Image: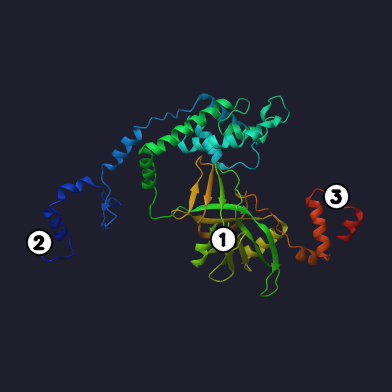
Amino acid sequence: MNLKSFTIDASYASEADRQDPLKAFKDKFHHPILNGNPVIYLCGNSLGLQPLQTASYIQEELEDRQIDLEVPQYIRDAAAKGLEYYADGLAGDGLVGSTVREARAMARGEISEDKVIRANAWGARHAPDLDAPQNSNADNDGFPGAGAVAHYLWGINPLDPMPARNWFERKADEVKAERVNNPAFVANMFRKQMEADPMTPKIEQREVTFSDIEMRKSEENGSDYMSFRGYAAVFNSFSEDMGFREIIKPGAFSKTLRSRNAIRMFLNHNSDIVLASTRAKTLRLQEDERGLLVDADLPDTTAGRDLSILMRRGDVDSMSFGFSVPKGGDSWSDDGAVRTLTQIRLHEVSVVTGFPAYKDTTATVRSFEVLAERTNTNADELAEAITLLENGKELDDEIGRAHV
């Protein structure tokens, strides 16, 4: 090209474009547009413009698929029935929102490959639930039990489960076989990645019930607001059914904790309500052989004082942690039913209300010492009385008088 000395102006750029020997290729790529105007885009060695034909090539691959995922009417009817029972409040406490959303899709005749694989695994795993008469006998006074409603929501009629079970199994096998032999699966994954922001990690949240929480007075000034210590995540503990079950392996938090990134604790994920932070050393996180141990000092603020009361009363007993999974940090079972997390990048933690994803972290939000002090009773005797009550036993007059 024959150009004058480089200058930063539009005329130089236009002349460079006019003389560019590769200008014929310019219209074959997507060019970034912001607010209707072209913008400057710097291309590195591996990050370039996307060809216009990429979408059509991917679509051609996807259209070549041979798997017929038309949802049978009996699965659609079962999902619709499950939604009716769900609306009547018969679904039980362990239901997750994704199951309801996917049931609505199945009732419309829509289903994803991922759902097919998970439904096949779920049906096999929960088949024993149908041994209970309230889940499999329409004449039983307890029908439909929570297990029956769950089956309906998964597209499986609990009164005649095998047609749906067989369909899910057959289609799951077809999907797995094609994923191995057909590049369309890779193309589909690529399309999903292109639709997402590749520079932003996917932030996930998991809610757990506090395990073995110890509530105590502040060591700084002895005021009534409390500090607490307990496990927010327990290793080798299966989550509740979220369409799949999840398990965190020992060491999953070790790398993120070594990085010493600033992590804050919020109330209900509201970044305007900061309860503690690792930078201020009011939030202390460590991983031991059992799980992720949280040690935090609640602030002497309205939110902190209110929260300490709610936690001591047992009204609030859950925590959620926001995380992302780095490449290679998780793996899935062949049937898609179990996800194993081996490396977690921790972004934030929150004290929340709600249902836990990891039920095995049992709720024990009590401080016998503090409660004993406030009620002028013996802590050991109080602990004994609470243990009896938790096990469904009544207190006799002698024990009851000891704790009044």
Q: Is residue 356 found left or right of 336 in the rendered image?
A: right
Q: Label 2 vs label 3: CA separation?
A: 95 Å
User: On the image, numbered disc 1 is attached to which residue?
Assistant: 266
How dense is the environment of label 2, judged by Cα within 10 Å: few (below 14), some, or many (20 and up)?
few
Q: Find residue 180 and report its horizontal and vertical position in percent.
A: 40, 38
- Label 3 amino acid? Glu
Depth order, front residue of 389/85: 389
- Farthest right residue? 398
Q: Find residue 254 and report its horizontal and vertical position in percent.
A: 53, 62
How dense is the environment of label 1, judged by Cα within 10 Å: few (below 14), some, or many (20 and up)?
many
Depth order, front residue of 382/231: 231
Quadrant in which the N terminus appears: bottom left
What residue is shown at x 30% (from left), y 41% (from top)? 55
Q: Is residue 102 found left or right of 306 in the rendered image?
A: left
User: On the image, numbered disc 2 is attached to which residue?
Assistant: 3
Mark found first going from the N terminus, 3 or 1: 1
Q: Find residue 181 and report its horizontal and vertical position in percent.
A: 38, 37
User: On the image, numbered disc 3 is attached to which residue?
Assistant: 394
> How many dots with numbers?
3
Mark found first going from the N terminus, 2 or 3: 2
Q: Find residue 325 and report its horizontal and vertical position in percent.
A: 47, 54
Depth order, front residue of 8/116: 116
Q: Is residue 209 found left or right of 15 in the rendered image?
A: right
Q: Label 2 vs label 1: CA separation?
A: 58 Å
Do the residues under discs 2 and 3 have CB atoms within 8 angstroms? no
- Farthest bottom residue? 221
What residue is shown at x 73% (from left), y 60% (from top)? 366
Nearer the camera: disc 2 or disc 3: 3
Tell me: residue 60, above or below residue 394: above
Q: Is residue 88 visible?
A: no
